[in-house]
Image (tube, rainbow, N blue to C red):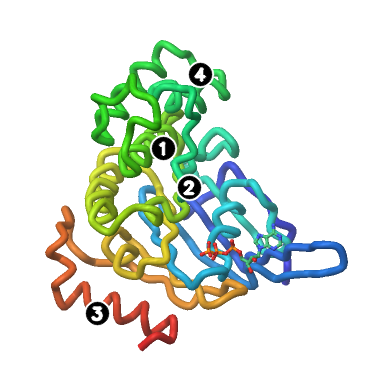
Amino acid sequence: MTVNPQLSSQSEGPFIQLQNVRKIYRTGTQEHVAVSDVTLDINDGELLSVVGPSGCGKTTMLKILAGLHEADGGTVKIGSSVANFEEGRDVGMVFQQPMLLKWRTITENVLLPAQILGLPMKAARNRAQDLLQMVGIGHASKKYPFELSGGMQQRAAIARALIHDPKLVLMDEPFGALDAMTREKMNLEMLRIWQESQKTIVFITHGIQEAVFLGSHCAVLSAGPARMADHFKIDLPHPRTLDIKTTDAFGEYVKRVYHQLGMD
Ligand SMILES: Nc1ncnc2c1ncn2[C@@H]1O[C@H](COP(=O)(O)OP(=O)(O)OP(=O)(O)O)[C@@H](O)[C@H]1O
């Protein structure tokens, strides 16, 4: 049965519950099913990596979670009795490109969501500096975006996503534009930031190894329109270091994803 989509601010159980979520894009008389059936629970504090082929509907799923798109079917519930959720206030987003405003310093860029939400600016400035330290670019706070490398810009974008202390951080291929070595480094940083910030994170990636390395859980979406092919917990120990990628356990998870994507 299809139920009207809704965002609920208070409910028992998992932080996020997606039940038979469906999304159709309509252009004139054309209909395109982008997400056909996604059912998924995400608990508070999880880092869920979402992996799937290009065009399968990952970004669409993220936009539904962000409240930017409404689902056409199924239910979307965010918030639990221990972690209530205010749509618009409790979401931070990181995109593939850092999208920093070039005429603002890094601190001013990080402060943007706080200004938009009308938060007290003195406290926000202190928090911006703490966040820039946490993401490893405290020394660059007064610089402008063009003075930073791609990796540093993406660190600033992560700090910007956290400035208003959102409960949910949505990341859409945030390291896709970085070179391979910077990407590995950012993966390590990402795990540290997740553990320090204790946020619930949904992290979209094309990288199967990246999905396994980062995720506390992993959702595999089949070729579009998106369907859940697999969803599992990743029981690799923390803190994770890059040499974990050479272990049998890591290889087994990678194989599982390849298999679900029909690539074995
Ligand atoms: N606004 C839109 N109008 C019509 N079709 C759309 C729109 N946005 C996305 N689509 C289509 O919906 C499908 C899913 O798109 P989506 O961006 O969610 O996929 P994705 O898995 O994130 O892709 P990629 O990994 O390449 O970024 C694609 O076929 C895309 O062309």
Tell me which amino acid carries mark 1. Answer: Ala
Residue that numbered label 4 is attached to: 119
Alpha carbon distance from label 4 to label 1: 19 Å
From the top left corner, tell me how far across and down residue 108 is, in percent: 44, 21
Quadrant location of the C terminus in the rendered image: bottom left
Tell me which amino acid carries mark 3. Answer: Glu
Residue that numbered label 3 is attached to: 252
Residue 237 - label = none
Disc 1 residue: CB within 8 Å of ligand 1: no
Query: Looking at the image, do the residues carrying marks 2 and 4 touch, with CB atoms under 8 Å apart?
Result: no
Alpha carbon distance from label 2 to label 4: 23 Å
Residue at x 80%, y 62% (from the top left corner): 27
Residue 157 - label = 1
Q: Give the class, few, some or many, for how many residues have Cα within 10 Å of label 2's Cα (few <14, many ≥20).
A: some
Residue at x 26%, y 45% (from the top left corner): 195
Residue at x 12%, y 64% (from the top left corner): 243
Residue that numbered label 2 is attached to: 95
Alpha carbon distance from label 3 to label 1: 33 Å
Name the side, left or right, on which 64 lies relative to 122: right
Among numbered discs 4 and 1, the one appearing first in the sequence: 4
Residue 193 vs residue 263, the one in the foreground? 263
Secondary structure, mark 3, is helix
